[in-house]
Image: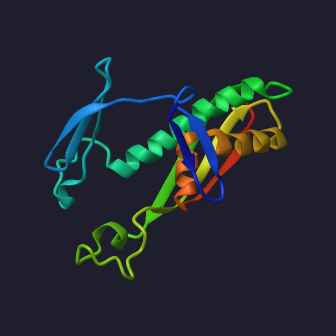
Amino acid sequence: MHRVCQVGRAARCFSSKKAMTYHLVGRGEGVKCSMERGDGMTISTDIPKAMGGTNTAPQPVELFLASLCGCELATAQFVARHMKPRISIDKIEFNVEASRDKQGALHLPLGDDSGAPVARLDRIWGQALVYTSASQDEVDKLAAEVKTRCPIANMAVLSGCILDIQWLQHSS
């Protein structure tokens, strides 16, 4: 049995028997990348024309932010169904931003990482407006569970990114 372990502050191990797997196949031309699932669903990324792209798809970081919001939404719906008392979510509206130090990815010369910042998002912030009849206290509990259970949020946090999305109750 194959085991993968994450070392560090949040050490966890899992076996391949319990792992969910994902598979995409695709190609990149210039700076545009298109990937396809087995069922034909295609996901693409590109960069703005000013940066050498064609501006025909989201930038990779924008797609990451969309993935974060989508993952948090799906995780929130799962968690809400299992909370005691169970809470109902009509919808969640996300408004998120991110920042990074451009020099992390663009630092030159290649091979000389001395003094270069880490190539990652350093902060993601914004709001998640939760349309529900639940109280703000219940939304706070929901948000805490989501932050620990959402794989995309976990990747961001474990990379050192500050994840500061305020979850706010909005009456349905």
| Frontmost residue, 77 versus 171 | 77
| Frontmost residue, 92 versus 121 | 121
Left or right side of 144 for 121: left
Residue at (53%, 53%) from the top-left corner? 156
Residue furthest out toward the front = 1
- Quadrant of the frame with the C terminus: top right
Residue at (34%, 48%) from the top-left corner? 60
Query: Residue 135 placed where, x, y %?
Result: 83, 38
Left or right side of 104 for 70: right
Residue furthest out toward the right = 85
Query: Residue 63 placed where, x, y %?
Result: 39, 44
Residue furthest out toward the left = 30
Residue 104 falls in which quadrant of the image? Answer: bottom left
Residue at (76%, 25%) from the top-left corner? 82
Query: Residue 61 placed where, x, y %?
Result: 38, 51
Residue 136 to residue 114: above or below: above
Residue 11 to residue 86: above or below: below
Residue at (79%, 30%) from the top-left corner? 133
Residue 3 falls in which quadrant of the image? Answer: top right
Residue 41 to residue 62: above or below: above
Left or right side of 141 for 102: left
Which color scheme does this rendered protein use?
Answer: rainbow
Q: Is residue 125 visible?
A: no
Count how many numbered circles sit on residues in the image: 0
Left or right side of 77 for 34: left
Query: Residue 128 placed where, x, y %?
Result: 62, 44
Residue furthest out toward the bottom = 115
Q: Is residue 133 visible?
A: yes
Residue 129 falls in which quadrant of the image? Answer: top right
